[in-house]
């Protein structure tokens, strides 16, 4: 048995009713060109497993820090901000101000200035907003996730908009050097993914067949209005590929699709 490099297949548009997907004589085809075959020209002998990962655009998380209606001179007002840095480490910053008056707006401006300084220094990747007594700390497209925790005398500090990192964003795939066998990723497109692990019977060498282990990453445009039909049809064709069994295909090959 030998192992081949994975294929990458991009569908920047999807046909209605799952028409991108067909199976015949053990050959599973995805897309409309000859290069769209999941195993170009080869019959699938056995599919091990299929994983599905749903793509998502980045959403900036928002933390709202709320000061009391009036501050007490001599009291400290503090909270903590945590964010992952460019090295992948989670770092936390202590944001504090000792009140010199009962004016909440002064404390609000002072706390904002501390965060502004951290942003200017490259320590945090956030934007700051909110009118006193609310201070909003929002993640950025470069780093959408930020969290906060109240430490001293704050009315509340917590996530008010839940964010997420981009999953399957075309620009990230391009930056990672991933290219398609029948299309290329589009920078602004969000792609979902089917990862198919399978064996096939390759061309004979010296009159002996070879069983080849392979993978195909099937990326498809998550924004398409017919995604559900495509997902259903692909899962069905993969699960029932043994239904068109020949001598080169294992009949009754049951395959489940697992979310990752």
Image (cartoon, rainbow, N blue to C red):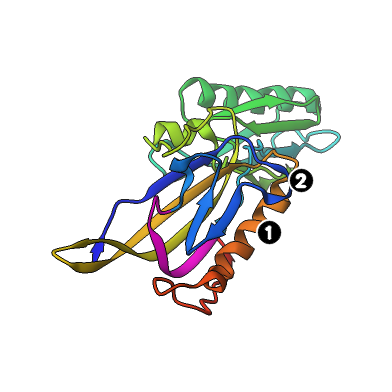
Question: Residue visible at 79% across and 28% down?
Answer: 104
Image quadrant holding the C terminus, namely bottom right
- Local crowd size for mark 2, using a 10 Å CA cut-off: few (<14), some (14–19), many (≥20): some
Give the camera-side residue of 151 and 36. 36
Q: Taking 224 as reference, is 170 left or right?
A: left
Spatial separation of the CA atoms under disc 1 and disc 2? 45 Å
Write down the residue under mark 1. 232
Q: Are marks 1 and 2 in contact (CB under 8 Å)?
A: no
Residue 206's place in the image compared with 188, above or below, is below
Q: Residue at x 58, y 30 (%)?
A: 141
* Numbered disc 2: secondary structure: strand
Q: Is residue 200 visible?
A: yes
| SS type, badge 1 | helix
Is 66 or 53 nearer to us in this picture?
Answer: 53
Dot 1 alpha-carbon crowd within 10 angstroms: few under 14, some 14 to 19, many 20 or more: few
Residue, far bottom: 252
Against 127, residue 71 (above or below) is below
Region in magenta: 39-51
Rendered image: mark on residue 18: none
Q: Which residue in the protein does label 2 denote?
A: 156
Using residue 228 as the reference point, say whether residue 167 is left or right of it: left
- Relative depth, front residue between 83 and 26: 26
Residue 256 sits in quarter: bottom right
User: Predominant secondary structure in magenta?
Assistant: strand
Q: Could you tell me which quadrant the N terminus lies in?
A: bottom left
What is the x, y in percent for residue 113?
A: 61, 22
């Amino acid at each position: 048995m030998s192992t081949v490099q994975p294929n990458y297949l991009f569908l920047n548009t999807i046909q209605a009713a799952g028409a991108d997907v067909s199976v015949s004589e053990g050959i599973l085809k995805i897309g409309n060109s000859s290069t769209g075959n999941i195993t170009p020209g080869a019959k699938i002998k056995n599919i091990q497993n299929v994983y599905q990962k749903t793509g998502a655009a980045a959403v900036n998380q928002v933390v709202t820090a709320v000061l009391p209606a009036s501050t007490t001179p001599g009291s400290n007002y503090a909270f903590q901000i945590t964010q992952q840095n460019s090295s992948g480490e989670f770092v936390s910053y202590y944001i504090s101000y000792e009140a010199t008056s009962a004016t909440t707006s002064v404390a609000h401006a002072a706390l904002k200035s501390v965060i502004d300084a951290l942003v200017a220094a490259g320590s945090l990747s956030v934007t700051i907003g909110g009118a006193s007594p609310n201070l909003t700390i929002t993640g950025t497209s470069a780093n959408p996730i930020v969290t906060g925790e109240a430490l001293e005398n704050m009315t509340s500090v917590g996530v008010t908009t839940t964010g997420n990192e981009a999953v399957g964003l075309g620009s990230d795939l391009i930056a990672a050097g991933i290219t398609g066998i029948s299309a290329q990723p589009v920078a602004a497109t969000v792609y979902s993914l089917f990862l198919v692990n399978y064996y096939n019977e390759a061309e004979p060498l010296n009159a002996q067949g070879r069983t080849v282990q392979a993978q195909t990453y099937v990326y498809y445009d998550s924004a398409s209005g017919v995604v559900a039909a495509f997902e259903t049809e692909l899962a069905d064709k993969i699960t029932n590929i043994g239904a068109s069994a020949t001598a080169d295909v294992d009949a009754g090959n049951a395959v489940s699709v697992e979310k990752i």
